[in-house]
Amino acid sequence: MPPDGRRFPLRLYGHRGAAAECPENTIPSFRRALEVGADALETDVHLTRDGHVVLSHDPTARRCCGVAREIEAARLDELRQWDAGWGFRGPDGKRPYAGQGIRIPTLEEMLVEFRGVRLNIDIKQTDPPMVEPVLALLRQHKAEHEVTLASFHLRTLLRVRLAGYAGETALPEAEVATMLYAPALLFSVLPWRGQAAQLPLSAGRQRFDTADMVARCHRLGVRLDFWVVNDAPTAERLLALGADGLMSDDPRTIAPAFAPHRAAPTP
């Protein structure tokens, strides 16, 4: 059991790395997140035309690289020419990382660079499906037990689970709805269900950032991570409620809120 009596390990995820300080979903961004206190990294994946799994939240390179090109239509050698530092803007509106040689990484590069670090990977692309190449990489690098696989698409996560994935999977929207509105016994006996609820603070009129929500997840054996939390007071409130993890673009700012919860209990 974690030091402060929590059922699940406490995690501060660098959401796309330290995206408030560095170009998102890049190796420098992930390195920075770990430097400033993150103990887990969150990222997103798409598949190139020639079958390489690469890290990007968006399906196109327009926002982050200034290239109006879909990732699934590009070969890796083309994608390597794009400037992944271009999209980041500093407080002054300038682009301090443009032209610095920062590229979109492959998932394999991340697995090698951050071996042993907890990863949360959101499988974005559904067509063509990319579950098989993702699982092949995780198995090749013996990383299944270090990686939570997430997706907004139930079909994607069912493919992951039915393929015998040995690691943790998140709950897609349909499973979250079942957890919220179905009898607890029904949810607890669902086959192939996920182990982690990863939620915003709210959706429409529905609030998730409540003690009741934390308690419900824990009664059902589900960890609860919130996204995206970038201010210390909100982080402190959620951790006091019993949240198991927070995803943040700015882990440097919220890392101090985790310190009291990581301290070993007094004998």
Image (cartoon, rainbow, N blue to C red):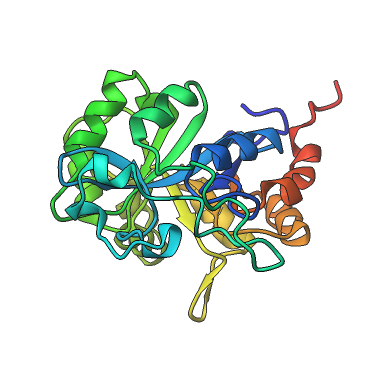
Measuring from the top left, give residue 22's x and y in whole percent: 60, 49
Q: Nearer the viewer, residue 65 or 258?
A: 65
- Percent coordinates x, y for residue 7 in the rendering: 58, 35
Quadrant (top left, top right, bottom left, bottom right) of the C terminus? top right
**Drawn side of residue 227 relative to residue 120, left or right:** right
Q: Is residue 70 above or below residue 25?
A: below
In screen coordinates, is 27 left or right of 175?
right
Question: At 48% across and 80% down in the image, what residue appears?
Answer: 204
Q: Residue placed farthest to the bottom in the image? A: 205
x then y, percent, for residue 39: 61, 34
- In depth, the one of 217 and 21 nearer the eye is 21
Query: Is residue 10 among what the camera can see?
Result: no
User: In the rendered image, which quarter is residue 231 located in?
Assistant: bottom right
Q: Is residue 214 visible?
A: yes
Q: Camera-side residue: 15 or 24?
A: 24
Residue 190 percent coordinates (x, y): 26, 47
Q: Residue at x 26, y 46 (%)?
A: 78
Residue at x-position 61% and y-position 26%: 1
